[in-house]
Each structure stands twice: as C-alpha cells, then as structure tokens.
C-alpha cells in the first residue's frame, strides 16, 4: 500500500547485480557515542518526541486528521497551474532556472506589496526580503538577533514551529498568556518590568496577532496599539507573523501591527503558503534597513536565494490578476468548514470542554478538564482513527497538557463532523472513567488549570442558558 | 535468499518499527540476501503471496507485530518467520498474562493487579483504589496491559496521582496493570536462541525515568553494557532471563526487562519483537558479546529456517 516500489526494484536489481547500496549497513552503539561527542550544545534542546511519533501516524489514510495545518490546495485550478508553468518554460526558462538576487526579485516584491496593500500596508520595496517560506523568515530573524540565553517573548500557546527555532538559538523563551482578545498585553508589561529588574531585555516579542495558530484568537485593536507603543517606548522589536490575515470569515478587519507602527519596531513576516501554496515555499520579511542588512547576510549563508522557479510562478500567477478571487474562494470554503466544526463541537464535546471561536484562520483551540492529558488522549483517539494536535506542543514549559488544536481547513464539513464526534466520544469516555476513580468532592474544577493560565475562555452559550 | 522484512504497520510504535526495519534490511542486504521491505498494511497478505519470500523477518513492534497477529498470518501462509511463535507472542505482549506465567514458574515478578476499563466504569473498581494501595503499597507503576516503548506508563507516587495515571494508561489499552514499584537498577537481557546476552543497564536521567522519548534519543539515556554487576548478580539476572525465556516458550530472540532490587532480580516483561534501532538494547548487547548486527540478523533468519525445517 504505502510501500515504495522503487526501492524494492532497486533492491532486487541490486540483488541481481550484487552492487553495494550507498547507505552504510548499520550504526553500532559505539558509533553513536562517537557522534554524540560531536554534536553542538544547541542540539541538546532540539528534541524529538513521543508526540512527533504519534503525529506521524496521523498521516495514515484511514485517519481523519484534524491535526494538520494544511491549506486545501485541491481548490487551486490545475489548468491555471499548467498554463503558468508553460509560460515560464516558453518565455523565461533560462532565467527561471538560474540563481536570483538574495533579497528576491523586484517582481516578487511587487506581488508581496499587493498582498500587503490588501491589509493596508505599504512597505518600501527595499525593506522586503523574500524567504523560503515563513519558517525561514523566523529562522533568519532569530539568527540575526539572538545570543544564547537571550529572552524572547512569545504567546502562550504559541506557534509550535516557532519553539524549535528559538530553542535552536538557545533563547530563553518566555510565554505570555492569551485570552479571547489575544496576548494579555498587561501581563506582557509586567513581565518586561520583571525582566528589567533582573537587568535583562528581550530581543523581540513574537506574536501571531490575527487568528492565532494555535489558539484561533485575534489581538484586540487597543492591545495592538499598546503593544506597538510598548515596543517604541522600550526600543524592543515585535515580530508580527501574519500568515492568515486575509483569511477572515467574519467581523471587521484589524490593522496589522506593522501598519500601526510604520515599520520601525515591527518586523513583519508574511507567506504565500495560506493564500496560494505552501509547496512553493515563499515567504517574506519586512524590516528596517539596519535589520535588513543582517537578514540579507544570514540569508546568503543559509541558501543564497529563494527558489527562482517559485518566484517566477508567483509572478505569473499575480499577472493573471485573479489572486484576490482565489483568496475569496478559499474564504468561502474555510468559512463553511469553520462553521461545521463549531456546530459539531456544540453537539459532540462534553459541557466540561471549552473552545475558541476564531473569526478567521485555520485553527481553533479546545480546553478539556485538567485531568485529561491530550497526548495520551491522542493515542486513544488514534484507535478511533482520528487525530488532533496535543496542546503541549504549543508551550515550552509543560503547560497545555489538557488542550488541543483542531484544524478545520483540511477536511470537508462531513468529515469534520465525524472527526469531532469521535474525539468527543473518547473525551466523554475519559471523563466517565475519571469520575469513577475520584469521588466528586475531590474533583478539580475545570477547564482552566490553577491560576487559569491556559487560555481562559468564556463559558459556552448552553452553560449560560442553564446556570 | 529472498527475505521479506515486515515493518511499520498501524501500531503506535510504527516509527520505531520503521527504524528497526530499515536497519535490518541494510544488514540482510549486506549479507547478500535479496531483501524486500514491506510496510505492513491492508495488502500485506496479498504482497506476501505474490512475493513468496523464503523467510520473513518481523521488525514490527506493538500491536499486530508483537501480539501474535502477524505470526498467525505467516503460519497460515507457511512462511517461516523470526522470533517467538504465536502463543509465546500473545503471552509476552499481555503483561498480566506474562506475570501469571512467571508466577507459575516460580520466577519473581512484582505484585500486581490488573483491571479492564469496565471494572472502573461499570463495576466501581474506583472504590477499591484504597485496597489496591494497601495491598501493593505506593509508589505504583501503572501500565497499559499491552503495548511497549513505555507509552502510557506512569508513576503513581501518591494516591492523588493514581487516577490520572490510570486514565492515561487506559488511553493505550482497555486493560491496565498496577504494579508494585521495585526500587533498584533497570536491566534488560537480550536472549538469542535461549542464550542470554550480556546485560544492559539502563540509566535514565531522573526526570526521564518513565519517558518514552528518552529511549529513542541519542544522549538522553545512559546505557551500560555489560552492566557493572558482581559475578553473582550477573548470574542471578541471566538465570532469571533464561528461566523467563523457557517459561514463555520463546524462540529466536527476545528481550527480558527486569529490576534488580534488594531481593534480587524481578522480571517485569518480555518483548517478543524487541527494538532493533540504533539506540536499541538487544543490538547493543549482541555487540558486547562480539555478535555484530549483521551476524545477529543472519542468526535470527537461520533460526527461523531451522524451526521451519523441523516441522
């Protein structure tokens, strides 16, 4: 089924010809020790995990995965893709196959400026560097700014893919809780005060202000203004990661931090992944000139330039002028799926659970009674062929063990309904089991943990109705 | 010779199994065999029928691979396979069943109780937690009855921790085992064709004591092989492992996990398809005995063929 026939062919061919394979036959325990002595200190914090092994299983075809962060690329018209690639082959093959400038092509920057203009931003083209996806953008920023031990501020929960980036530069990641209006900027201020008393200063504050991954919440307008003010007052950088800004399904648009600040203290990270394709690996950073100079040097060291072919594809795609219509079609699809998930949650999740109600993006965040460990729950859910992301992935400090991230962009409404039903069933089973084990008077109040540090959410409507 | 290496599958230990399988494939190829790696899926039986391998090397861990399921299929298809046979796999995969066999054979194993989920949800076993605690004493180790790689294994040091540990363990199986914790050294003995290999001592960092991830990550757990034990201790541990092998009627190769406490060795469990990854214990033990990984895999295949020839 999932076996690689090519490799088998190669193997049997080799058996016939007797030629050795290129891979080393095996590694001995002694080899491992030898390598262990060579690893850099920072690899000690780059950890693999049981969760990652479990997550691999979610790729099984019979598993309904609400775990992915995948945009639905099946909605991209194949004939349009074919026409663009053909045009590139016919008109600019030699250039499309050549190296490009480290900062990216001017044409790509034009496309980026169109996308940013849709959210009211007008960056100077010289303030833009094209990167290999938003992920490289984060890596380049961390590489340019972080020394080992430097504090970095992130949200709690935060984008799980940012944690290993900060860890690999040995930063001390401090997480500020998020509520339904985004990062608690008041708590951020208190934390900055505390750090200042210790004589420490965070290099930057990392935030996904719109439809946050994983919490699904959006930073409120007045908090945005305060955050930008704080950065200015204290001369700190804010890294605004905005992959989902254009994927709003309801409510009024909020100004990006970059627009509010004018680009002095806010570094902006954008990506084509969620509005076009994650496979083309195209993202970007907007930064003021002194920071840009360092980012360019880092980019040169990392990979010289972003894929020229991908950039040409984006030029062609934008030249067609239909990108806004495509984003609009994505919005329609995802809005329906979000609604399907919210209504499935109402029906299938127990009253002890709560969840965010995102106005856009791809994810929502559900919090369960604190005695449920969602990494273990994932193992149980996989027995029912359904998957989600355990909350602990979004924290550096072991919090979030009773939360989960659910994705609504990757499956159709019917599949979402079935997936949520199955997860609801296994949660109900664990609640029943726990109730059988602990007499009622000893039970913890849930869903928020002690101090309510994990995304306290308003009660569900049905709980309000019946007090 | 045409050898099929069965790996992957649907169990929670799929990733570990893929690593074991890849390594076995390389070793068997280096020995000159025609090797076919098979990620066990819905088409496994059909593929095996088509390919007609002369022998199957089972590198599947966890459910399906280690519980006698794939062994039953291979019996049916009359394909010789490595490791213990169906009944031994079934007993070894089920920890309470293993412990019954050990008790019956007079081999020390820590006291335990085992419950199904319905005992808690339907029969009020939760009310008996105090008796369990009294009988076995704290701390307790709570484990899913079936499964490997420390998945779902939790330590219950206090009465308050027990319910959480039990709920966790039930995430992995519908039966759980509550076992008295033995203070002592954590040991593993690989057994090849009934002969115990040098003992491996596992020294996890304190915080990783029962952590799944630590076992597969370079540098997080310290392994000492051969374990630094007195001659007397070594003999006691190896004798216990050999007796366990006999009691469960293991064949081919297997791994016995024990604790060496003040009262001597206590057997915890038997792995019918132990890990064969870069950081796994059986290859480490074999190497300490002067048996390289290629030779080890070759022996496993020979044993499988010899067993088939006897029948």
Image: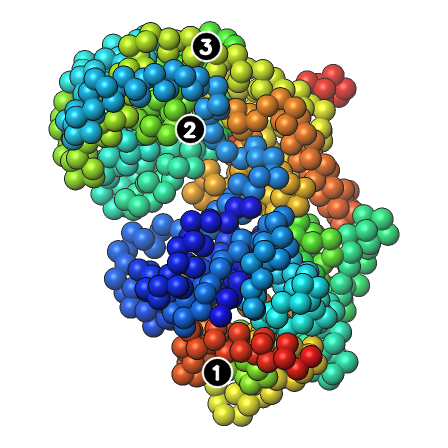
At 27% from the left and 44% from the top, the residue drawn is: A169
* Front label number (3 vs 2): 3
Other-residue count near label 1 (Cα within 10 Å), few / some / many at <14 / 14–19 / ≥20: many
Give the residue at mark 3. A328
Give the residue at mark 1. B198
Expressed as whole percent of the image width and height from the top left, the position of residue A119 reads 35, 10
Query: Quick check: A313 above or below A191?
Result: above
Labels 3 and 1 within one chain: no
Total marks in image: 3
Residues at marks 2 and 1, CA–CA distance in whole angstroms: 56 Å
* Front label number (3 vs 1): 3
Query: Quick check: A16 above or below A199?
Result: below
- Which sits earlier in the primary sequence, circle 3 or circle 2? 2
Q: Indicate which disc residue A187 carries.
A: 2
Secondary structure under tag 2 reads helix
Q: Quadrant of the C terminus of chain B?
A: bottom right
Task: Tell me: B229 left or right of A229.
Answer: right
Labels 2 and 1 within one chain: no
Expressed as whole percent of the image width and height from the top left, the position of residue A323 reads 37, 11
């Amino acid at each position: 089924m999932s076996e690689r026939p090519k490799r088998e062919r190669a193997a049997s061919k080799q058996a016939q010809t007797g030629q050795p394979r290129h891979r080393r036959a095996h590694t001995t325990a002694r080899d491992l020790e030898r390598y262990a002595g060579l690893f850099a200190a920072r690899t000690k914090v780059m950890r693999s995990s049981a969760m990652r092994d479990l997550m691999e299983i979610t790729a099984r075809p019979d598993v309904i995965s609400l775990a992915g962060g995948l945009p639905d690329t099946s909605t991209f018209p194949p004939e349009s893709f074919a026409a663009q690639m053909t045009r590139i082959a016919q008109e600019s093959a030699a250039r499309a196959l050549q190296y490009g400038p480290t900062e990216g092509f001017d044409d790509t920057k034009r496309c980026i400026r169109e996308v940013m203009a849709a959210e009211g931003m007008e960056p100077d083209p010289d303030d833009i560097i094209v990167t290999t996806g938003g992920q490289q953008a984060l890596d380049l920023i961390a590489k340019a700014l972080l020394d080992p031990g430097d504090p970095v501020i992130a949200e709690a929960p935060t984008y799980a893919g940012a944690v290993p980036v900060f860890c690999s530069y040995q930063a001390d990641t401090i997480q500020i809780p998020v509520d339904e209006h985004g990062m608690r900027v008041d708590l951020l201020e208190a934390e900055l005060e505390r750090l200042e008393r210790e004589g420490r200063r965070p290099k930057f504050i990392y935030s996904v202000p719109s439809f946050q991954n994983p919490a699904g919440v959006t930073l409120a307008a007045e908090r945005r203004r305060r955050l930008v003010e704080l950065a200015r007052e204290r001369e700190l950088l804010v890294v605004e990661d905005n992959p989902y800004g254009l994927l709003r399904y309801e409510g009024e648009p909020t100004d990006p931090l970059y627009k509010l600040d004018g680009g002095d203290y806010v570094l902006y990270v954008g990506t084509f992944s969620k509005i076009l394709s994650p496979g083309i690996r195209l993202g970007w950073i907007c930064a003021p000139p002194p920071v840009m100079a360092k980012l360019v040097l880092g980019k040169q060291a990392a990979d010289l330039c972003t894929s020229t072919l991908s950039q040409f594809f984006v030029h062609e795609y934008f030249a067609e002028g239909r990108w806004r219509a495509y984003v609009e079609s994505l919005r329609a699809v995802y809005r329906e799926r979000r609604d399907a998930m919210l209504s499935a949650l109402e029906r299938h999740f127990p009253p002890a659970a709560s969840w965010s109600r995102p106005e856009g993006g791809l994810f929502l965040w559900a919090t369960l009674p604190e005695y449920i460990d969602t990494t273990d729950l994932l193992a149980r859910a996989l027995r029912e062929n359904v998957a989600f992301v355990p909350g602990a992935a979004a924290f550096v400090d072991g919090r979030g063990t009773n939360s989960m991230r659910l994705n609504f962009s990757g499956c159709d409404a019917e599949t979402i309904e079935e997936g949520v039903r199955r997860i609801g069933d296994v949660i109900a089973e664990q609640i029943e089991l726990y109730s059988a084990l602990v007499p009622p008077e000893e039970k913890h109040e849930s869903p928020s943990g002690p101090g309510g540090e994990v995304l306290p959410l308003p009660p569900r409507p049905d709980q309000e109705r019946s007090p | 010779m045409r050898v099929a290496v069965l790996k992957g599958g649907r169990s929670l230990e799929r990733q570990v199994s893929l690593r074991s399988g890849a390594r076995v494939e390389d070793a068997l190829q280096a020995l000159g065999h025609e090797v076919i790696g098979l990620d066990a899926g819905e088409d496994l039986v059909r593929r095996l029928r088509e390919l007609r391998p002369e022998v199957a090397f089972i590198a599947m861990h966890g459910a399906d691979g280690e519980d006698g399921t794939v062994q039953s299929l291979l019996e049916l298809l009359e394909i010789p396979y490595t490791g213990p046979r169906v009944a031994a796999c079934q007993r070894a995969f089920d920890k309470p069943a293993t412990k019954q066999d050990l008790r019956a054979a007079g081999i020390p194993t820590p006291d335990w109780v085992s419950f199904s989920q319905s005992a808690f949800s339907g029969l009020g076993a939760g009310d008996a937690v105090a008796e369990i605690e009294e009988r076995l004493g704290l701390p307790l180790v709570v484990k899913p009855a079936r499964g490997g790689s420390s998945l779902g294994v939790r330590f219950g040091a206090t009465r308050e921790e027990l319910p959480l540990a039990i709920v966790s363990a039930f995430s992995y199986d519908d039966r759980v085992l509550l076992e008295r914790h033995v203070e002592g050294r954590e040991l593993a003995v690989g057994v090849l064709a009934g002969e115990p290999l040098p003992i491996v001592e596992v020294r996890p960092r304190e915080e990783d004591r029962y952590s799944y991830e630590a076992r597969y990550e370079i540098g997080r757990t310290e392994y000492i092989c051969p374990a630094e034990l007195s001659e007397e201790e070594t003999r006691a541990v190896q004798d216990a492992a050999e007796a366990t092998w006999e009691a469960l009627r293991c064949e081919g190769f297997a791994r016995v996990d024990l604790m060496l406490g003040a009262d001597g060795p206590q057997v915890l469990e038997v792995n019918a398809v132990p890990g064969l990854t870069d950081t796994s214990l059986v290859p480490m033990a074999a190497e300490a005995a002067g048996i390289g990984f290629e030779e080890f895999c070759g022996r496993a295949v020979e044993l499988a063929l010899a067993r088939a020839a006897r029948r």
